[in-house]
Image (spheres, rainbow, N blue to C red):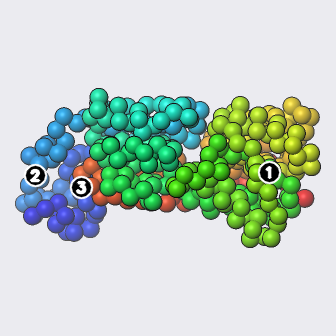
């Protein structure tokens, strides 16, 4: 008799049964009680020796966060830490600069700390392609797709960046805007054979123009910047200087958009009267800007919960999952129709 038999009997996933047996987080008390009752009826005995051998010398979970100014990532980390409070295993977040090598840091953490599993918030394609094969620890890449990598120990949970950006740009185009600028990440024009976030969002912007038959010159209408307030400020300033007839800006993060909002104000212009503005992520601060920011909201709670759920299952039985979480267009006060 195996844990798979218990899963079939209860109707719950193997990962859920495993967490109930190990008193891990992510399982309601009612579900845990039911599973334990079924286990008792079946006379199932978990193979603790095998589990101890599998997890020998390993402890806790590590979170590798790419970028020190990403507010969405900060919310997701907080959600993950709250979800793991019931566990006796420590949770250790590690932050790297936007331009640093997150996989190299992960290799060091894995060697020194020997975590049970690792969560990556954001990632660079080249770093994963060149070095992730050296990492044997069960891992989940969060907010960035990893299904094209093919690594046997890497799952992913993300939103559809192409569709999200297409929805955002389409919102501006359908409001009558034609002179639209984009503040993108530094890898917006670098596919690297993988799903870099900015590259995918740029493809979504292209799709929005293409589907409506509206001309689009991406190199002319786009500036690349860091995902920060300063990056957004400098990006908006460059766009307003380059494109004097600009009527709208799409920023690939809310933090960029908030920086852009200040740059627009400093030029004596107003949002949305003179320039419409749309962000991406749906962080809390977007609702407290003046005006409130229109944005693509990523569900931080669901991203955290599903990433952790998938990682715990992968630690238990090696199951790899690549999941897409829905997004939502939140209409604020920063876009006007022409």
Task: Give left or right: position of 54 versus 220.
Answer: left
Secondary structure beneath dot 1 equals helix
Residue 47 disc label:
2
Residue 221 disc label:
1
Q: Vertical placement of 337 versus 242: above or below?
A: below
> Which comes before the other along the chain, label 3 or label 2?
2
> Which comes before the other along the chain, label 1 or label 2?
2
Residue 290 in view, yes or no: no
> Which comes before the other along the chain, label 1 or label 3?
1
Q: Quadrant of the N terminus?
A: bottom left
Q: Write down the residue under mark 3.
A: 317
Residue 279, given in percent of the width and then of the height, sits at 70, 47
Residue 39, given in percent of the width and then of the height, sits at 14, 59
Secondary structure beneath dot 3 equals helix
Residue 239, given in percent of the width and then of the height, sits at 82, 43
Q: Vertical placement of 108 versus 185: above or below?
A: above
The residue sitting at 87% across, 51% down in the picture is 247
Secondary structure beneath dot 2 equals loop
- 1 vs 2, front mark: 1
The residue sitting at 39% across, 49% down in the picture is 140
Tell me the distance, in whole angstroms, between the alpha carbons under discs 1 and 3: 47 Å
Tell me the distance, in whole angstroms, between the alpha carbons under discs 3 and 2: 13 Å
Splitting the image into 4 quarters, where does residue 87 fall?
Answer: top left
Task: Give left or right: position of 284 versus 15.
Answer: right
Q: Are marks 1 and 2 in contact (CB under 8 Å)?
A: no
């Amino acid at each position: 008799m195996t844990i798979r038999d218990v899963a079939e009997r209860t109707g719950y996933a193997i990962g859920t049964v495993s967490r109930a047996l190990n008193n891990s987080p992510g399982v309601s008390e009612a579900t845990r009680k039911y599973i334990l009752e079924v286990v008792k009826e079946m006379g199932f005995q978990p193979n603790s020796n095998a589990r101890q051998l599998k997890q020998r010398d390993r402890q806790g979970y590590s979170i590798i966060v790419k970028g020190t100014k990403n507010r969405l990532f900060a919310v997701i980390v907080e959600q993950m830490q709250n979800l793991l409070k019931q566990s006796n295993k420590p949770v250790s977040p590690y932050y790297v600069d936007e331009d640093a090598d997150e996989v190299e840091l992960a290799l060091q953490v894995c060697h020194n700390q020997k975590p049970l599993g690792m969560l990556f918030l954001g990632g660079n394609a080249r770093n994963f392609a060149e070095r992730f094969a050296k990492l044997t620890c069960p891992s989940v890449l969060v907010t960035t797709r990893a299904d094209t990598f093919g690594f046997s120990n890497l799952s992913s949970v993300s939103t559809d960046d192409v569709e999200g950006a297409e929805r955002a740009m389409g919102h501006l185009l359908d409001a009558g805007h034609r002179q639209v600028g984009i503040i993108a990440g530094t890898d917006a024009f670098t596919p690297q054979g993988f799903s870099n976030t900015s590259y995918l969002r740029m493809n979504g912007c292209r799709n929005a123009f293409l589907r409506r038959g509206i001309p689009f010159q991406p190199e002319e209408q786009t500036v690349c910047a860091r995902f920060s307030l300063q990056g957004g400020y400098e990006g908006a300033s460059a766009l307003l200087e380059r494109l004097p007839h600009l009527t709208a800006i799409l920023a690939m993060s809310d933090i960029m958009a908030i920086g852009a909002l200040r740059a627009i104000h400093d030029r004596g212009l107003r949002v949305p009267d003179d320039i419409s503005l749309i962000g991406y992520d749906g962080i809390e601060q977007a609702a407290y800007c003046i005006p409130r920011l229109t944005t693509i909201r990523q569900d931080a709670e669901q991203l955290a919960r599903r990433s952790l759920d998938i990682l715990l299952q992968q630690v238990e039985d090696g199951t790899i999952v690549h999941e897409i979480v829905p997004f939502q267009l939140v209409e604020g006060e920063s876009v006007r129709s022409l």
